[in-house]
Image: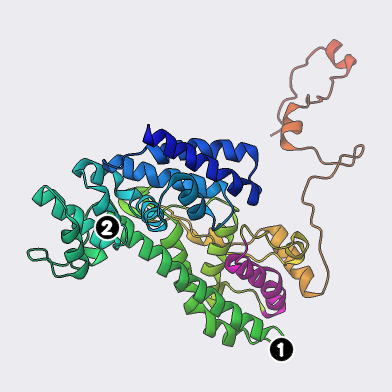
Amino acid sequence: MKNINKASAFASAAHPFYEANSIPEEAQTQLEDTAVFLVSVTRRSTAEAFELGEHLEKAAALLPEGTLEKWAVERCGYTSRHIRTARAVSRNLEAYKAMLVELAVGPTVLGKLSSATPEQIEQAIGFAGLNGRLRVQDVAAIMAGSKQGVEPKPEVDPYDAGGLDGLKAIIAIKVREGMKSFAGHIEEIRAHVVEALPKNNIVKKDLAEKTHLTARLAHRELESLVQFVQPHPNSKHTMSSTALPTKSGWEKLSRLLYKMGSETYWPDKTELRIWLETEVVPLLDWATSKKAGPIWPDAKAAALAVPVAETVVVEAPKGSKSEVASVPSVEESLTSMAAAFGMVATVDLSLPEKKGQESIPTLTEALAKTEKRVQRPAFLAKAKPTSPPSATV
């Protein structure tokens, strides 16, 4: 009877609070449901302690910021300290809830443990597992680092940590540090190129000398970061990196870095500036952009770029001639020659249309055409054969 009267008194005290803070009726209904649980909870089990904190977190989301403690004090009869501790248990120990419930750690111990570090929490759970119980003084001793028989947890080198968690840890290091190094090398190459562009005369040899080794390193870094490893298709005993999707942005960057790794593959002096302005700088900008999903370099700028014959690495059988792979096409050669004179060449190597009898038939057409034979004159058929004239000695 006393509990019912107490609950009714708290409910009556909450109405002025709702009016003063302009709480909507829908939110009031939800808060009242939460209040019923908070008033009735016994806090005698580990699960209830967590559930108490979860309900307080839900109530905080319905109330104006900073008013949860006032509401819980007036409506549910809690103290401010009790509210802060319950919320800390829910927030800081949620990841360990299953183990703590299994160990039946008491609500008071949970309150003490909620202010511990993750390492101390794990150490306390280990202590409870070995000793079968966990007391407030045990947690206090662990947090103070003076608990007898409990050694502080040594720091484990990520490269000595086994299991999938250990692997994830060193992969995270690889991604974090590898990306930082790769981005730094791309910025270094870009800085040298941007520095050279304003000059009237770009010295190809000097610029290549400053960038080619960094480009090789960046190419290998990119390969290490984003490509997988698989058996080589032509040799099962050889392992090689997988290829990036053809014509994708990162595949183009990979080819560019490979090309910049050797001066041999750079365009001639007449084409160098256009190549740097329309291909190199836009690609490097795209790769190091801090925007989410940067747009590919302007298509108009890419259209102005002069096609350059690139060396294509081909895995060929022994004895075959690999030089053919690096020979530029007819279209590329003609376009490159026209660009040297400041012209844009449009090359069309398709067969011309046939016009009357002047066009030359293809081999297929010639073989398909019926052969015209010379007809034998009619009078020859009526003539009788005569004996051949005798040979004159």
Stretch in magenta: 269-291
Q: Position of residue 348 (x, y in %)?
A: 79, 52
Instruction: Measure the C-alpha gap from mark 1 to mark 2.
Output: 66 Å
- Residue 284 in magenta stretch: yes
In the rendered image, residue 110, in percent from the top left (x then y), is placed at 27, 52
Which residue corresponds to the image point at 25% horizontal and 42% vertical from the top-left?
101
Q: Nearer the viewer, residue 183 or 98?
A: 98
Q: Amino acid at mark 2?
A: Leu
In this picture, is 194 found above or below 219?
below
Along the viewing direction, whichever of 177 and 385 lies nearer the viewer: 177
Earlier-in-chain disc, 1 versus 2? 2
Of labels 1 and 2, the one closer to you = 2
Residue 265 to residue 325: above or below = below
Percent across and percent down for residue 116 are 29, 62
Q: Is residue 345 above or below residue 351?
A: below
- Residue positioned 81% across, 58% down in the render: 346
At horizontal 59% and vertical 62% (from top left) the residue drawn is: 327
Label at residue 302:
none
Q: Colour scheme used in the picture?
A: rainbow
**Quadrant that contains the N terminus:** top left
Q: Is residue 369 visible?
A: yes
Q: Nearer the viewer, residue 41 or 111?
A: 41
- Residue at coordinates 63% horizontally, 67% vertically from top-left? 283
- Rendered image quadrant of residue 356: top right
Front residue of this view, candidates 392 and 322: 322
| Element type at mark 2 | helix
Question: Dot 2, crowdedness within 10 Å: few (<14), some or many (≥20)?
Answer: many
Query: In the image, is residue 351 part of the stretch drawn in magenta?
Result: no
Q: Is residue 233 visible?
A: no
| Residue identifier under label 2 | 113
